[in-house]
């Protein structure tokens, strides 16, 4: 029996070496080897994603656990709105004076909410979280988004956004036009695994986009978190033979520092009740199948420590030094980065109207 095991182990080693050799040939030829993997995944894809998901009766405790993973600001939040006349979808910061007497928007003003004298933000409470998770509203008006950059310039997670924010995409719930973006999400997932990170991939509510989440154990300085994320992208792209991230749109939080009164950018929360019926707003595996037990996979995801983040940055810096590359070329290089692309100016970049998701720790609503 021992000889048989040793023989199998030898065969496995030979196959691994052969696999590495074939990948190296593709690398040198500049050919991605994800295409064949994607075709394989399509064969394994379950066409009825909604029925895969085990229904869950949402409780107060669930709301606390959920926000404990997706922890953002509680003094302000946003909600999804659908303009029926045009089909346009937006996320608006919730304010007690929104479109009431004295609201600048009633006169067509584009003043930022943070600069408005009538500003009176609504707090994020447990009932909004539960409404989002239950998804009783047929027009998805109960979908909420949070602001991940906290007032002390820290955050509890990073999220990489692969949704479409080009012109008019808001009429499609920010959906991509084809499935080519999946290759980049698969690549980023592999990049994380190579570097000892276990990410959570969420298929967004449109079904044609994704968010990749990385959670932190404690509040982490946003400048450190963003440096970690940017370096992961740059060094990771090299490790998996990905020449560019054409569909990757943004990393949140987007800022290192909040201006006075600023709230930053937001993202829509996952596990929204209505979208889950179609298998969207759901966490997915490597074959893009929704996990049957969405809560089990969510709560099983490990959170990175600050020590881990700093050690990885040192490791990457050491690698760059050994390769005679200035560290600035890794995370502060001037000019176009692999994931940069020309895009229209987003109004949401300045007044905080958009979509987002969340991150870590156990948060208890009072």
Image (cartoon, rainbow, N blue to C red):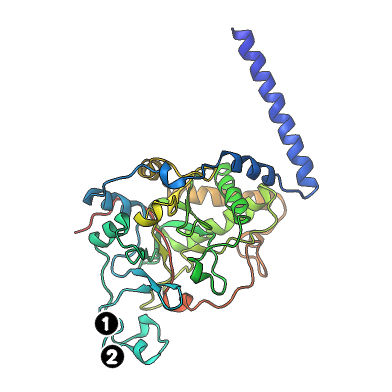
Task: Classify residue 43 by image quadrant.
Answer: top right
Marks 2 and 1 sit apart, C-alpha to C-alpha, by 8 Å
To which residue does mark 2 refer? 102
- As rendered, which of 31 and 46 lies closer to the eye? 46
Q: In this view, does 97 lie to the left or right of 224?
A: left
Task: Classify residue 19 by image quadrant.
Answer: top right
Residue 302 visible in this rendered orientation of the protein: no
Above or below, 161 against 196 in this view is: below
As helix, strand or loop, the secondary structure at mark 2 comes to loop
- CB under 8 Å between discs 2 and 1: yes
Q: Please state the horizontal and vertical placement of residue 177, each as a whole percent of the image.
A: 59, 62
Q: Please state the horizontal and vertical placement of residue 68, each as a whole percent of the image.
A: 31, 52
Above or below, 233 against 103 in this view is: above
Q: Please state the horizontal and vertical placement of residue 260, each as a whole percent of the image.
A: 38, 78
The residue sitting at 64% across, 72% down in the picture is 342
To which residue does mark 1 refer? 97
Task: Classify residue 153 by image quadrant.
Answer: bottom left
As helix, strand or loop, the secondary structure at mark 1 comes to loop
């Amino acid at each position: 029996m021992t000889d048989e095991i040793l023989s199998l182990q030898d065969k496995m080693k030979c196959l691994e070496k052969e696999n590495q050799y074939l990948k190296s040939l593709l690398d040198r030829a500049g050919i991605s080897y994800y295409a064949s993997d994607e075709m394989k995944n399509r064969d394994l894809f379950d066409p009825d994603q909604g029925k895969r998901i085990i229904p869950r009766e949402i409780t107060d405790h669930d709301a606390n656990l959920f926000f404990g993973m997706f922890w953002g600001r509680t003094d302000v939040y946003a909600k999804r709105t659908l303009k029926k006349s045009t089909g346009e979808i937006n996320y608006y910061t919730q304010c007690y004076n929104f479109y009431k007497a004295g609201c600048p928007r009633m006169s067509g003003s584009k003043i930022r909410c943070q600069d408005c004298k009538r500003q009176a933000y609504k707090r994020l409470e447990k009932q909004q979280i539960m409404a989002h998770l239950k998804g009783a509203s047929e027009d998805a008006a109960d979908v909420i988004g949070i602001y991940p950059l906290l007032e002390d310039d820290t955050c509890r997670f990073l999220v990489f956004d692969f949704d479409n924010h080009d012109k008019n995409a808001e009429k499609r719930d920010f959906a991509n036009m084809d499935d080519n973006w999946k290759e980049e999400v698969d690549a980023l997932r592999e990049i994380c695994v190579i570097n000892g990170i276990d990410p959570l991939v969420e298929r967004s509510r449109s079904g044609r986009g994704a968010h990749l989440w990385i959670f932190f154990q404690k509040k982490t300085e946003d400048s450190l978190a963003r440096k970690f994320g940017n370096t992961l992208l740059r060094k990771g792209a090299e490790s998996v033979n990905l020449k560019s991230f054409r569909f990757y749109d943004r990393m949140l939080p987007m800022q290192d520092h909040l201006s006075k009164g600023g709230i930053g950018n937001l993202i829509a929360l996952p596990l929204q009740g209505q979208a889950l019926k179609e298998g969207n707003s759901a966490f997915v595996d490597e074959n893009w199948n929704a996990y049957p037990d969405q809560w089990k996979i969510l709560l099983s995801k490990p959170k990175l420590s600050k020590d881990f983040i700093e050690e990885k940055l040192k490791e990457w810096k050491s690698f760059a030094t050994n390769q005679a590359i200035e560290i600035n070329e890794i995370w502060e290089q001037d000019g176009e980065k692999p994931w940069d692309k020309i895009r229209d100016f987003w109004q949401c970049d300045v007044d905080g109207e958009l979509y987002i998701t969340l991150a870590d720790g156990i948060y208890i609503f009072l």
